[in-house]
Image (tube, grey):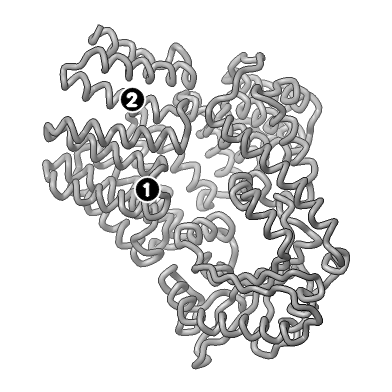
Amino acid sequence: MTNISASDGEDEIQKVLDRIKGFQENDDSSSLLRPEAQTFLQTAHKFLECRKRMDATFEKIEGSKVLEDFVLGLPENCSHEKDFRQQSTLGEPARTLDELYKAATIIRPLFEEFVNGIVEQAKKRTKTLSDIRVVYVPLKGRERALEKAQNEYHDKGPGPDIAWLSDINRLSVIFETVDDIIICLELIRDSDHIQIVKAKNRFKHPTLTGYRDFNVKFRLKSADGGFQHTCELQIHQKDLKKVCIEMESHESYEYFRSYYVGETDTLEESLEDLKHIATGNVLDFSFVHELLETSKDERRLDRLGALFEIKLCEYHLALKVYTKLLEIQMRKYGPLHESIGSAYLKIATVLRKQGKEDDAIAVFRESLNAFRNLIGEDSIQVATVCIKLAHSLQRQGNLEEALDLYKQSLQIYKKTVGLIHRDSANTFHSMATVLKQQGKLVEATDLLKQALGIFRETCGEDVLQASYAYNTLGTVYEMQDKMEDAMELYKKSLHIKRGIAGKAHPYVSFTLNCIANLLRKEGDLVKALSTYQESLDSYYKSVGEGHPLVGFTCTKIANVLCDQGKPKDSKIYYEKALVVYLKVYGADHPKVAKVKEEMRKVT
């Protein structure tokens, strides 16, 4: 693929689009939904039903209009000023999760005391005997906090991104009547003990699931006055909260949160799209084709492309939608626009998920060139694409170019966010994986220890990124025949992942596979088989039966059964893997050929 300049005309733009469209599969028929899509379908139906019940419940609440119209005395869309960043116990902006959580823990008793005081005052002022109840919830989980800082505040200045997390400390109060809610809000508004930072009247602007409450964020001073900390108080209405619990609305919200992020102004349109997709047990291709022919809404296409890619794993549909998005943006902005680089990146990512590594690499290069030409060599976007391109090159065995791209990314991070940053630590980790493949195990070990040191300093050890590094260091030790050290690190990685994600999660399955590999290598086939089976069960529960990782683990189980002299049992698992790979990759993929070859050996 070649670059085109702003002076190139319609013919050149069309040539680029034709190349991209050449990557698409010709699949125009409706098909039964994949297991991942079945989960989507069930969640979507529950989500839409929840919206309906929430709306109906709110309409029945006496005085609901008063709640909609209530204003706390500051703009609801007021943004955090730099002085509202979370502080460490020294009064400086918090730099790490450890600093933030230390401050949050110290302020917690003051937060609870303030809220309980407000509730007691409200009870004295109320004219009814209605129920008012405080709900105590723990501090926000560290992994979710880290994810939020990265996803929502990564580019927010001034940093650090951790300092913009204002909902680590949370409490809820549940009221029965509208009058009591208003009394509570007025008491908060008039208090001299806090500084209100932000308020959201979600009785007026409901959440995705239709849930309504009032959310207030305010700062409290520590007892010695040395620092301030922002806390979040949620004001709930009893009937709405009951529906929320019955309908498990928070689970639906979490599932669809990325689909609707930033789209509150087009929420109804988003819901209509969801209804079109979730009308039965087949994908509505007619809806998709109509969308591709008529829609010029970039945000809508972007949102639906992500839905097909991430939630439904229908990569051919995601590719069609992203290609349409690229076409609209090229014709609207021309080839020299930042959105073009982003569209290339989305297309390349889908191609890689389809197993079309060569095509993905070609489009990653287009994305990299676009960003370099438009926003310069030292941008975060360039670093991001360098890493994704390096991952694909690494999988293709082009280790030297991959390592060079990782080094370029590291230099960008050094200039933009500094070396003591999670992005830098992740890049050290990626570089170590290349060195491991090259057999440079001492150098790989040094980089992994450097990465782990940065994780400890910035976000602590008990985060997923650190668990990945422990996992990789375990494989390095395994390659050096340091089996006990390797097993210790695998177990440490597994402990972190289970603490964050539970027992059924792809991260957990990955490390279980590493442990099983080591057990097989040491000749403990019984434990290896049971560990692989545990991994497979985790994959079934977390990603569904049709995911390629299920196919991969089935081949591992088949291999152990071969070692045990059980060819018939082995063939069953090879067949399971083949079904998955044919569905995901198609008949011509190398993984399909490899499984068929293994099956011939045991037949």
Q: What amino acid does circle 2 point to?
A: Cys
Residue 108, image x, y percentages = 51, 79
Which image quadrant for residue 459?
bottom left
Residue 447 shows up from this direction: no
Whole-angstrom CA distance, mark 2 to mark 1, is: 36 Å
How many residues crowd mark 1 within 10 Å: few (<14), some (14–19), many (20+)? some
Q: How many numbered marks appear?
A: 2
User: Can you say whether 171 is above or below 349 in the image?
Assistant: below
Question: Which of the two labelled residues, at mark 2 and mark 1, occupies the earlier sequence position?
Answer: 1
Which residue, given by chain and number where applicable, does mark 2 sit on?
Answer: 554
Pick the quarter of the image with the C terminus.
top left
Residue 29, image x, y percentages = 66, 14
Which image quadrant for residue 124?
bottom right
Single out the residue that lies furthest toward the bottom.
224
Residue 11, image x, y percentages = 72, 21
x 33%, y 52%: residue: 467
Depth check, front residue: 361 or 220? 220
Circle 2: element type:
helix
Single out the residue that lies furthest toward the front.
129
User: Can you say whether 406 is above or below 525 in the image?
Assistant: below
Which residue, given by chain and number where applicable, does mark 1 sit on?
Answer: 407
Residue 185, image x, y percentages = 75, 77
x 34%, y 48%: residue: 468
Q: What amino acid does circle 1 point to?
A: Lys
Depth check, front residue: 294 or 245? 245
